[in-house]
Amino acid sequence: MRIKSILAVATFTLCTLAQAQMGSAPSVGPLGGQADPAKAINIMLSMYEQEAMGAVKAMPADKFSFAPTHATFAPTQGETFDGVRTFAQQAAHVAQANYFFFTTISGLKPDRDMKAIASLTNKDEVVAALADSFAFGHKAIATITPANAFTVIKGADGLDTRATVATFAVAHGYDHYGQMVEYLRMNGITPPASAK
């Protein structure tokens, strides 16, 4: 019995140390309890924000106009790259989408001209627009309550509750993050999230 107790304490200690070294996600509450939907969704947005902002900041300013072309791949692939977004356009698109989705769930007025974001090409301007869109997203998510999280809302392109629109905003962002990661790697840059 004593050996079992020592093993249990040792296992708990090792697990705790491993979690501390790896860093664990913030808790939304006790196991089996009810989580605050705003807190749970905000954690998801924060995790995505950290990865996306890291990727956008890692791309050198002179590579913000990069987009894949035939020259990027083997000649035998025969792919067409007409209309493929540049790196700047990928990040600007995410910023615009954040404003769209988070305006939809909250009714808050965007603090930027959403249409003007599409024309940004300068790294500093794109990084600022993306950062501002995440700040706006956090404010919008704070308006989600247990009472309104699953209330049907209008204008969400078929994603009909605040909780589904907010979580789709994160899912949509990860789609473009994956593309931005590929752009970084095509330019010999290791994404910060992969360098950990």
Image (cartoon, rainbow, N blue to C red):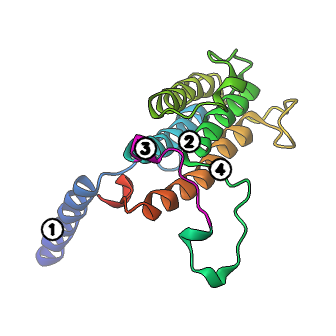
Residue 37 vs residue 128, the one in the foreground: 128
The three-letter code of the residue at mark 4 reads Arg
Residue at image point 65% right, 50% down: 85
The numbered dot on residue 57 is: none
Residue 119 against residue 75 in the figure, above or below: above
Cα gap from disc 2 to disc 4, whole angstroms: 8 Å
List the residue tagged with mark 2.
Answer: 88
Cα gap from disc 4 to disc 1, whole angstroms: 52 Å
Residue 138: x %, y % from top left:
55, 27
Residue at image point 52% right, 32% down: 126
Q: Nearer the viewer, mark 2 or mark 1?
A: 2
The three-letter code of the residue at mark 2 reads Ala
The three-letter code of the residue at mark 1 reads Ala
Q: Are marks 4 and 1 in contact (CB under 8 Å)?
A: no
Q: Nearer the viewer, mark 4 or mark 1?
A: 4
List the residue tagged with mark 1.
Answer: 10
List the residue tagged with mark 4.
Answer: 85
Tell me which segment is drawn in magenta. 59-69
In this picture, residue 157 sits left or right of residue 81: right
List the residue tagged with mark 3.
Answer: 62
Q: Nearer the viewer, mark 3 or mark 4?
A: 3
Residue 129 against residue 165 in the figure, above or below: above
Q: In this rendering, does residue 29 appear at all? A: no
Report helix, strand or loop for mark 4.
loop
Residue 164 vs residue 87, the one in the foreground: 87
Residue 79 vs residue 35, the one in the foreground: 79
For label 3, count other residues whose C-alpha is less than 10 Å away and answer few (under 14), some (14-19) or many (20+).
Answer: few
Residue at image point 73% right, 53% down: 83
Residue 156: x %, y % from top left:
83, 36
Cα gap from disc 1 to disc 3, whole angstroms: 52 Å
Q: How many marks?
A: 4
Residue at image point 53% right, 44% down: 44
